[in-house]
Amino acid sequence: MKYWLRYSKSGLMRFVGHLDMLQTWERILRRAGIPLTFSQGFSPRPLLSLAAPLPVGMSSYAEYLELETREEVPALTKMVTPALPQGMEVLGAVRVPTDVKALMGLIRYADYKVEDLGPEQWTCLEQQLSSFLDKEVVLQEVKRKGGASTINIRPLVASARLEDGALQLRLATGSTANLRVEDFLNQFSLAHANLTISRRELYLEKEGQLFTPFEYITCSYSR
Amino acid sequence: MQEILRLVEKPARYLGNEWNAVHKDHEGRVTIALAFPDVYEIGMSHLGLQILYHVANQRDDTVAERVYAPWTDMEEQMRQRNIPLFALESQRPVREFDLLGFTLQYEMSFSNIINMLDLAQIPLLAKDRGEDDPLVMAGGPCAYNPEPLADFLDFVVLGEAEQALSDVIEVYAEAKAQGLDRYNTLLALSRVPGVYVPSFYQVHYNGDGTIAGVEPIGDVPPVVYKRVLADLDPQFYPTEPVVPFLGTVHDRLMLEIFRGCTRGCRFCQAGMIYRPVRERNRQDLLALAQAALKASGHNEVSLMSLSTMDYSDLSNLLDEFLDRFSCDHIRLSLPSLRADSFSVEQAMKVQQSRRGGLTLAPEAGSQRLRNVINKQVTEDDLLRAVASAQAEGWQSVKLYFMIGLPTETNEDLEGIYELARKAAWAHRYLGVQGKPLNVTVSAAAFVPKAWTPFQWEPQDSMYLLEEKQRLLRNLFSRERRLKLNYHGAELSFLEAIFARGDRRLGAVLLAAHRRGCRFDGWSEHFSFAKWMQAFADAEVDPTFYANRHRRREEVFPWDHLSPGVDKEWLWQEREAAWRQDTTVDCRPTYCSVCGVCQQLPTQIQLAKE
Ligand code: SF4
């Protein structure tokens, strides 16, 4: 049985690194008594994976965990909730047909909200954002595993607008194309130390349309 | 606070919201900060502190919180912003707590204790502390010679603290209720068995620098004996251990299967101070494991003790463990193996994977020297163990040795090489089929410790230790399958100084602190030059402590702090060592009358007779 679990990671939990989250999740699920499925081989590991890495220090209200269980767990959310540390909350769960590919490989975009912009930062964005969006090529140096490289970041920005006192972003995310919020903000020379950045949603793509992971399952398999 | 968490490398060290962390209101409670003077990943891997955290928080009248040495990046931020050292759970400054307890696990963490007091903005010297400062206490193995820290500690708890801590809390609460001042509170505490208040003892010195006597001032016991549990009551075991968010050194459930060790290796302080052996029974162990696994979500259990293979009911225990937990993919790990075939059999049972390699500790390279140190392993045992491991598919073996042991000669050192070589080709030696193994030898420098039969012995000079390392290096360079590891002699030298140091080393610790020494166990921070300058600053000769022959009658700085073992018995063991006589294990059927069971309310307890 395969499930996708949506959860939030905020407060102090923001500071737990992405790589440590898998271990944390295994412990949560063990405490909750979820019958996990394990890999074969000499050192079996539970079949768990996270949809997209989240930078340390960033809150998210749209983290997704993919897990496999030996049997059906109808009360998944209810079972998991009491085993969660402060700063994490399960926001929903969906049973996923086994023929759906691994979530990690399906993610295409993420929404971010950048808050606590100072008045100067706000004005600067108001002035520069539309000209940025009008362009087709915006070269920007980004950090990669190997070092820095210069790429065209414009196609990686699906939308960027000022709304409700915050900067709302939709950036390419995932294994095919990825833009970090930090790299986007560098384009506008914004010092991000004082900004509050959070992830709000993840999207998959199907026939040119974007769906949240849960929508993807319901619209593809509701019939 | 959250602001600085963004700026440090591993913020998860400082969160305090780990699963099973206890958050209590401080109001009306005795507040204790339990401190481990090293980084979080090491401190969280220590069972003893988890036990005390559990014992203290079980009491409604007490709140215990944890604190670890902030890593250097965090320290920098804290000093810049004038943030005092805080306890993790409430993030409150530790200087606001009633009690601040340090665990003394290894000498090279002493500089961190001073640094943590400084970060906490608590006066470093006990005599400078005021009524509002916490009482600074300490416990753990190095507490059997806490004298180098005597100036910094208000009191010390000797031995097993499960019950002693409760006694301390009760006396403290009573003193607080009566409005006693610091001095009178300490006086009341000094009446608790196992509690030692250094300032209530005056040390007198001879002209040659040795100690003439330690004089109790007022009505305090002339000798403080350790606290010891009659049996390992399951109620003291933390079935709800705090579960870290980031990988720690022992990132698993630590299940203590027994305390003490029957082997009596003459270099080993743990083997002396944790006597006698008290085993938990199998049913208790299974029940504790079950409860703690459920409450923590851990996926691995480590069966902890000083010598796990000696647990009297081991085979049954492992079978039942595997029976009960393997369906949930709970791994079992055995931290220490004995060099015999039984151990290899047991290791095979629990380790599906052979990747880790097999670790054995013959400690010395010749039978003669093994007799001297009372390490009762024969070459034959060892090679049989290795050969059966080889037959079972292990590809590498790690062998632990010591260099600089009393009576050691070049022959013994060559013996290390010979033994490693035989181990690599153990199959051939025993006339069976197989492929040679890779053997890694780790050669640690011997550090004589207080309360061992070797407490009278000098440590080899650094020069001699380095000579010996060179000799080994030359031998090992001949053989591609053999690898040699050793630590710098400098660290061992410092360890030897503090392990048998006295109060005059307090000035050295202060000087070292001023020169910025901390995290000495970390090679990137350890500076031998700074330490040597600190000794010069304090005008203390380090070789007096590390490299001096001590006479039989010498009064030691720790003679008045007893783990129950008789000094005379230790001397007899030392004499036996020189005769190369071994001493049989202590078992219900044989007792060498070391003094522990005679002087303290405890006796050896086995799970299976
Ligand atoms: S008194 Fe005897 S049984 Fe007790 S610890 Fe010492 S040697 Fe072992």
Image: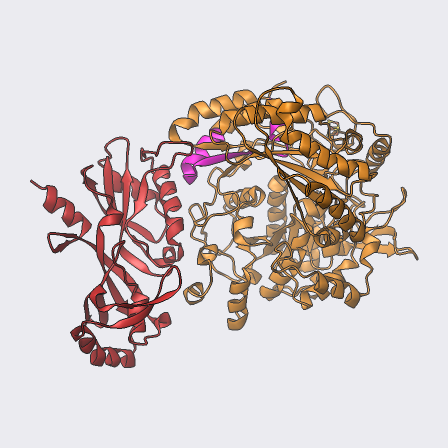
Q: Can you give x and y, in whole percent of width and height, for residue B115 in the image?
A: 63, 62
Quarter holding residue A209 = bottom left
Residue drawn 31% across the image and 33% down it: A35
The answer to whether B83 is drawn above or below residue B341 in the figure is: below
The chain letter corresponding to red is: A
Q: How is the image coloured?
A: by chain
Q: How many marks?
A: 0
Query: Which tint is chain B?
Result: orange
Q: Which residues are magenta?
A: B287-312
Image quadrant containing the N terminus of chain B:
bottom left
Residue A74 x/y as whole percent: 22, 36
Quadrant assignment, res B390: top right
Q: Residue furthest left?
A: A223
The one nearer the camera, B607 or A214, is: A214
Say which residue appears at 41% left-offset and 35% top-offset.
B294
Residue B6, given in percent of the width and then of the height, sits at: 42, 64
From where the camera sits, is residue B217 visible?
no
- State yes or no: residue B292 in magenta: yes
Q: Nearer the viewer, residue B4 or B560?
A: B4
Taking the image as shown, residue A48 lies to the left or right of residue B237, namely left
Q: The C terminus of chain B appears in which quarter of the rendering?
A: top right
Quadrant hosting ligand 1: top right
Location of residue A115 in the rendering, given as x and y in whole percent from the top left corner: 28, 69
In the depicted view, which residue is nearer to us: B372 or B391? B391
Regarding residue B367, the answer to whether it shows in the image is yes
In-image side of B215 versus B499 (left or right): right
Q: Residue at x 55, y 21 (%)?
A: B315
User: Is residue B303 rendered magenta in the image?
Assistant: yes
Left or right of A163 on screen, residue A67:
right
